[in-house]
């Protein structure tokens, strides 16, 4: 596992690209609280949003299935 100091930080467009999502979808996930963990680089509403690559992969791991019968309804 990467050391926190060596962790890669991604902007929302780069994070969306990694997840194969549109940036708008990732923004909607932030608003609804259903997306990956994110950070605000500073105080206030206009602070830059950043994602750790490890948080993105951990979030995606929650959606790993071996069969369609495993889907939660």
Image (tube, rainbow, N blue to C red):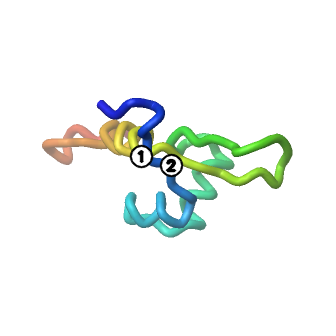
Give the residue at mark 2. Answer: 9
Residue 60 picture quarter: top left
Front-lying residue, 29 or 4: 4
Give the residue at mark 1. Answer: 53
In the image, residue 47 above or below residue 23: above
Are the residues tagged 2 and 1 within 8 Å (C-beta)? yes
Image label count: 2
Q: Residues within 10 Å of mark 2 (few under 14, many from 20)?
A: some
From the image, state whether disc 2 or disc 1 is nearer to you: 2
Alpha carbon separation for disc pair 2 and 1:
6 Å
Quadrant position of the N terminus in the picture: top left
Q: Residues within 10 Å of mark 1 (few under 14, many from 20)?
A: some
Q: Residue at x 77, y 51 (%)?
A: 47
Front-lying residue, 68 or 51: 51
Residue 18 picture quarter: bottom left
Name the secondary structure under disc 2.
strand
Earlier residue among tags 2 and 1: 2
Seen in the image, is 13 located left or right of residue 66?
right
Q: Residue 7's spot in the image, x, y percent?
A: 43, 40
Seen in the image, is 39 located left or right of residue 19?
right
Q: Residue 48's spot in the image, x, y percent?
A: 71, 54
Q: Residue 38's spot in the image, x, y percent?
A: 58, 42
Name the secondary structure under disc 1.
helix
């Amino acid at each position: 596992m990467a050391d926190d100091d060596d962790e890669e930080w991604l902007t929302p467009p780069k994070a969306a690209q990694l997840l194969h999502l549109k940036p708008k979808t990732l923004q909607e996930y932030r608003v609804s609280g259903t997306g990956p963990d994110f950070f605000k680089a500073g105080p206030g509403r206009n602070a830059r949003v950043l994602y750790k690559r490890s948080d993105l992969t951990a979030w995606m791991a929650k959606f790993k299935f071996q069969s369609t019968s495993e889907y939660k309804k």
